[in-house]
Amino acid sequence: WADEKYLKPALENDPLLHWDCGSDDDSEKEELDSSKAALEKELADTKSQLDRMKHFVRDLMTEKTTDTTSTDDTSYFESYSHFGIHREMLQDKVRTEAYR
C-alpha cells in the first residue's frame, strides 16, 4: 500500500479531492444559502402547480363521467330508434349467419 500507484485518483482532477472542508468562505456559504432558498421556492411552486393540476383532473374526470354516461347512452339508444339500422342489419347475410 505504500506504492504511489495506489494514490492516483480514479477521476482526473476529481473535485472532491480539491474541496477544502475547513474553509470558512462566507461568500460560498451565502451563495449556497441563496441557491437553497431559490430551490425551496421552486419546489413549493411546483407542489402548488401539482395540487392545482390534481384538482383540475379530478374535477374534469368527475364532470366527464357524469355527462358522458348520459350522452353515450342517449346516442346509443337513438341510433337504434330508426328503422333503417334494423333493416341494414337484417339484410347483412354475413352478420345474420354469424348469429345462427
Image (cartoon, rainbow, N blue to C red):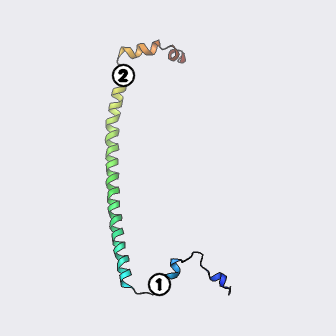
Q: Residue 23 falls in which quadrant of the image?
A: bottom left
Which residue lies at the image location 50% right of the left edge and 82% below the top edge?
A: 18
Q: Return the residue nearer the eye: 14 or 84.
A: 14
Q: Which of marks 1 and 2 is in front?
A: 1
Residue 79 shows which numbered tag?
A: 2
Q: Does 73 sit left or right of 13 as displayed?
A: left
- Of 8 and 24, the residue lying toward us: 8
Residue 85 location in percent, x, y?
Answer: 40, 17
Snapshot quadrant of residue 77? top left
In the image, residue 92 lies at what x, y percent? 48, 14
Please say if 77 is above or below 40. Answer: above
Query: Decide: marks 1, 2 in contact (CB < 8 A)?
Result: no
Residue at 43%, 14% in the rendered image = 88
For the residue marked with disc 2, what is the amino acid?
Answer: Ser
CA–CA distance in space, label 1 to label 2:
77 Å
Give the amino acid at mark 1.
Answer: Cys
Residue 35 point in image, percent of width and height? 36, 73
Query: In the rendering, which numbered label is found on residue 21?
Result: 1
The residue drawn where x is 51% and y is 78% is: 16
